[in-house]
Image (tube, rainbow, N blue to C red):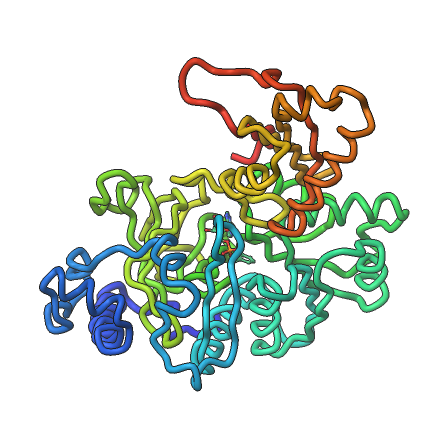
């Protein structure tokens, strides 16, 4: 089934023509409504009239997460505050989070795009669909929620946490579909096994998984243990949230909702555009967004694009699985974490030396973060070699990390000069998860 055949199956020529028209419109819109872009375009001597076709996109400036941080909170918002009806925030930077405001029309587009994804997974009216992404500032919960409602299926806003209760709900309500992170899906399977609930006691048949990278092996395991078809769902808050791209019945690469989000692949170093098939950094221009439209937003996600015909009948460009990032962002239990954020928390505490190591593991299908940090010599000399104060300091750091970054980390305080030094670039992160 296809939710919007006109948009999802239009010829490549028609799509490019539509994108060209919308691109002109969005450039005109930001030129007149976002001083940040007006200034940038004027500096580059570009007027909206210079942008008429998709090919003209190369003339436009890039936008980065740093731009959003520098203009916190509403500097890149184009719509007047009176038109904004929802505000989300993205975790994942030192200092200011990224704030995204949506107009009523934006929420409509988001819901439509999300309905396209869910239809593509085979979800429809009569389905009972549980959303186990976090509800709140994160876009996962509410984003999928509105898509399910738009589609006309019944949504169960389960959110995250309390997995045993969730398993009971799945069973008792006859839930047929679920959306959550792929690692949470495996945790759910494990909890079901521990509770003695077999996959045949549920009616689950489909899952929408994303917000973090996952592998074909994880897909096989999720499908086998939960007895479902597992589909990829990709998105990012700055562009909209979940719904930017989605897999279809072919379960091979993800169709981009490219009438709304215009994709490009660029070399992350030179920023030169790369052709289809070549791997590089994914860049999006929002074509219809009113609240916070973005030109050439650098996602930092590494992937490639392909426009070969798909067996499902959709004609939209597909992106391959995300193979990594061009920055050092980690995604731990679905939360974006930059090592520099952890560093700034550690350095705000006088006991900690600027020597640390983040170790990321996956235990029982849930990500764990261990932060090892050296204590400063002067504190060590005051008796930190005895067990009790170290435990107290570990607890204190752990609580600070939790309150500032919303992540739970196991903290190990180390003696001065005990963490391995390297000759070349210092290694701050060891990621033992095998997710590529
Ligand atoms: O993670 C939105 C989302 C929610 C997507 C629920 C899918 C499902 P952010 O918190 O802004 O938004 O994080 C965006 O997460 O740039 C990728 O690095 C990563 N990511 C999201 N989906 C996938 C996926 C949401 N399917 C960042 N595969 C993105 C790999 C993903 N990485």
The structure residue drawn at horizontal position 47% and vertical position 15%, both measured from the top left corner, is 422
Residue 77, given in percent of the width and then of the height, sits at: 37, 72
Residue 271 sits in quarter: top left
Decide which of 50, 254 is in the foreground and name it. Answer: 50
Residue 284 sits in quarter: bottom left
Residue 136, given in percent of the width and then of the height, sits at: 62, 66
Q: Is residue 182 left or right of residue 256?
A: right
How many marks are shown on the rendered structure? 0
Q: Residue furthest bottom?
A: 82
Quick check: 334 above or below 85? above
Quick check: 94 above or below 388? below
Decide which of 199, 100 is in the foreground and name it. Answer: 100
The structure residue drawn at horizontal position 47% and vertical position 58%, both measured from the top left corner, is 236
The structure residue drawn at horizontal position 87% and vertical position 43%, both measured from the top left corner, is 194
Residue 215, given in percent of the width and then of the height, sits at: 55, 39
Quick check: 168 above or below 153? above
Q: Is residue 107 left or right of residue 23?
A: right
Report whether residue 59 is seen: yes
The structure residue drawn at horizontal position 35% and vertical position 61%, both measured from the top left corner, is 315
Q: Is residue 411 left or right of residue 263?
A: right
Q: Residue furthest right?
A: 196
Decide which of 118, 393 is in the foreground and name it. Answer: 393
Report whether residue 223 is seen: no
Residue 33, given in percent of the width and then of the height, sits at: 27, 77
């Amino acid at each position: 089934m296809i939710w919007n055949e006109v948009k999802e199956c239009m010829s490549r020529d028609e799509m490019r023509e539509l994108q060209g028209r919308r691109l002109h419109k969005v450039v005109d819109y930001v030129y007149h409504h976002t001083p940040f872009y007006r200034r940038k375009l004027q500096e580059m001597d570009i007027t909206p009239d210079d942008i008429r076709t998709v090919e003209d996109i190369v003339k436009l400036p890039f936008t980065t997460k740093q731009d959003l941080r520098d203009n916190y909170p509403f500097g890149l918002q184009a719509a007047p505050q009176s038109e904004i009806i929802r505000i989300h925030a993205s975790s994942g930077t030192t200092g200011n989070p990224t704030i995204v405001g949506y107009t009523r029309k934006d929420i409509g587009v988001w819901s439509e795009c999300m309905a396209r994804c869910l239809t593509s997974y085979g979800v429809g009216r009569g389905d009972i669909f549980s959303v186990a992404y976090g509800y709140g500032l994160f876009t996962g919960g509410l984003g999928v929620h509105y898509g399910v409602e738009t589609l006309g299926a019944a949504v169960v806003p389960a959110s995250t946490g309390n997995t045993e209760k969730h398993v009971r709900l799945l069973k008792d309500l006859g839930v047929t579909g679920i959306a959550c992170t792929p690692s949470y899906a495996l945790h759910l399977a494990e909890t079901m096994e521990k509770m003695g609930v077999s996959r045949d006691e549920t009616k689950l048949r489909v899952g929408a998984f994303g917000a973090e990278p996952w592998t074909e092996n994880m897909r096989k395991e999720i499908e086998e243990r939960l007895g479902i078809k597992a589909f990829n769902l990709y998105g990012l808050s700055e562009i909209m949230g979940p719904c930017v791209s989605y897999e279809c019945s072919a379960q091979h690469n993800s169709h981009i909702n490219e009438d709304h989000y215009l994709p490009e692949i660029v070399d992350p170093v030179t920023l030169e555009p790369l052709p289809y098939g070549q791997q590089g950094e994914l860049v999006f221009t929002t074509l219809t967004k009113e609240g916070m439209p973005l030109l050439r937003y650098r996602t930092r996600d590494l992937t490639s694009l392909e426009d070969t015909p798909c067996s499902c009948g959709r004609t939209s460009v597909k992106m391959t699985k995300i193979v990594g990032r061009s920055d050092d962002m980690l995604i731990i239990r679905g939360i974006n974490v930059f090592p520099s954020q952890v560093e700034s928390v550690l350095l705000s505490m006088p006991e900690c030396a600027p020597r640390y190591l983040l170790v990321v593991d996956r235990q029982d299908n849930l990500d764990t973060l261990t932060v090892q940090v050296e204590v400063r010599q002067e504190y060590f000399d005051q008796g930190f070699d005895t067990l009790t104060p170290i435990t107290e300091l570990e607890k204190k750091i752990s609580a600070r990390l939790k309150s500032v970054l919303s992540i739970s980390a196991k903290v190990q305080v180390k003696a001065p000069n005990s963490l391995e030094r390297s000759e070349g670039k210092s290694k701050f992160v060891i990621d033992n998860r095998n997710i590529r």
